[in-house]
Amino acid sequence: MKIVLIFDQGLAGAGGKSNPNVGLNAAKGGIGSALMLESHFAKIGATVAATLYCGNEFFLNNQEEVVTKMTAMVKKVSPDFVLCGPCFNFPDYAKMAAMISASILEHTDIPSCAMMSVENADTIEAYKDQTPIVKMPKKGGTGLNDSIAALCELISATVNHSGDVENIKSRICY
Amino acid sequence: MMQKLEKLLMPIANVLSKNKVLSAIRDGFLITVPITIVGSIFLLIANFPLEGFLNLMTSIFGEGWDAYLGRVSAIAFDCVALLGVLSIGYCYSREKGLDNRIGGAVVALVCFLIITPQKAFVTVEGAAEAASFSGFQFTFLGTAGMFLAMIVAIVSVEIYAWAIKKKLIIKLPDGVPPAVMESFAALIPSGIAMTIFFVVGIIFSHTSFEYAHYFIYQVLQTPLVGLGKMAGFEVIYQFLSTLFWFFGINGPAVTNTIFSPIHKVLTVENYEAAQAGLEMTNIFTSGFSDFFCNFGGGGSTLGLVIMMAFLAKSNRMKTLGKLSLPAGIFGINEPIIFGLPIVLNPLMAIPFILAPVVNTVIGYVATVIGFMPVTMGVQLPWTCPIIFSGFLVTGSVTGSIVQIVQLIIDVLIYYPFFKLLDQRYLEEETATAGQTDEIDDLSFDDLGLD
């Protein structure tokens, strides 16, 4: 099972707040925070095919371009699932993730979800009907491991058409 | 094993970081930090660790110039309980969901002052008996009153919030300005809280303790602060703080609920000792915790970041190291916590937890054997870079030397783990360089949009 990750510059390991204007980038395999997801992915037989990322300010200044190009790139890689997150409580990244995931679901046949903490209330409210948004703790909050496990349950059920996807969504998504 | 540990730690983290009382105390002290830092700067100038500087100031401003600076540092340190009761009262009002938070804070302050001794005695040389005057003494508004301040803030706001929830308020007709409405609404709740503390004050005056200050100081503050004077105190704090971080939980946010009041008292006790011309004895002050245990953020990752920037062979680590180094020098390591990553990365858990503990032991030993002086009562911003911070917080170059030694040891602790991860990333990079598939050619530059 191939997964594509959509990150911001912080999670991609391309610098944190000091480097917000990184343009669109694609890396083969998982980079940065992918390492904390990969052991969970292995349990459901999933690997990270590619990581796509850009800086949070670059996104804010070029929202349409970022969403369109990310969607096109996902289409080109054609993975089994796209994870836009985990966004913790980073507001710009959460908005970017929700918009890209919604766009992927609208314009391609590839399943996708976003993942963020409850602090991004405005984004969740605006996009939760257009894309599944998996619950997770804020940065430094408790339950990160559990939320990644829940995410894997959703990915596995969606890709393998096993289990009651709607039921899982209602349990672990906003 | 890791899963079991997480199962054990999660509920503790939940209880500690979500407990309203502990959060209010932790956040309340955070509010006082800017005041303490500014006060520390005034204190540092008045006691700057260079004789030449002090002589220069005297030659410009004349004898006694430092007394003016002392007026500012005295408020930051000698009134620490007073500031604490107000800010904790405010934070607890927030936790209780009160609209009028400043109302709660003011009630907490007033209740604290009601039970604080309002008469002081001074012995004048040559006089037959001690003279008394009306007024508050620094003694009761400073460290000695700190734990009482926490208790009073929580209890008084609890009473205040209870009365408001029970609608024990005076309602004015519509059309009255909101500020007037709010102040009348607070009247009965404030009255109840103040009356209760009035009674508490009377009760204590009939005991051998005389004042609540003496009681809390003896039965609660002395034993708890005593823990902070034990050799293992800081090691436990550092160990727990990083252990939580490794699971993605903000460690200090959890541990500070318990440890920060003790750190604060230990720090201000050193200040008070210095002001009184006595020897400073507390090792584990906020300054020690901030500047001799962690360099470059939690887990003391500065050594790792330096290696990443200059020794890494994999592009990924080298790039991230160079990007993270400037922030790392100022104690911020968010880029690598998530970018390397350290969170949920079992390989990095060992040095991440070990390095601060080893630093603590080195700092402790260096202080005990007298190589480095005890840290002063000053509190600097935790972003103050290594070497400068060691000098300023101890007033001695040996402080900087200890920091350099600690940094070198951190490098050695991280080295094997750094090599392993670097090797792994390098292998990934070279492996993918050899075999190409369509994903290698991924580029947003030539992306066809349809």
Image: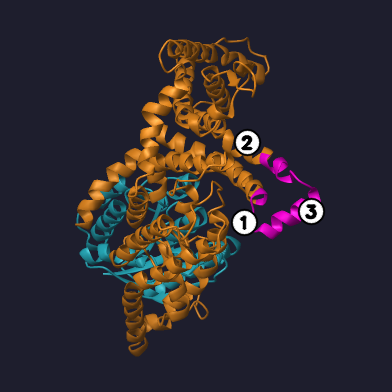
Chain colours: A cyan, B orange
Q: Quadrant of residue A7?
A: bottom left
Magenta segment: does it hold B26? Answer: no
* Residue sitting nearer the eye, B252 or B35: B35
Structural distance between the alpha carbons of marks 2 and 1: 22 Å
Q: Which mark is residue B49?
A: 1
Amino acid carrying label 1: it is Pro
Quarter of the image that includes the N terminus of chain A: bottom left
Amino acid carrying label 2: it is Ile
* Residue sitting nearer the eye, B305 or B43: B43
Residue B62 x/y as whole percent? 79, 47
Structural distance between the alpha carbons of marks 3 and 2: 27 Å
Q: Quadrant of residue B70?
A: top right
Give the residue number, with chain letter if any, for mark 2: B75
Q: Which mark is residue A113?
A: none
Camera-near label (3 vs 2) is 3
Residue at position x 33%, y 44% in the image: B13
Residues at discs 3 and 2 in contact (Cβ within 8 Å): no
Magenta segment: does it hold B60? Answer: yes
Chain for numbered disc 1: B
Amino acid carrying label 3: it is Ser
Give the residue number, with chain letter if any, for mark 3: B59
Q: Which residues are magenta?
A: B45-70
Chain for numbered disc 3: B
Residue at position x 48%, y 23% in the image: B157
Visible residue check, residue B450: no
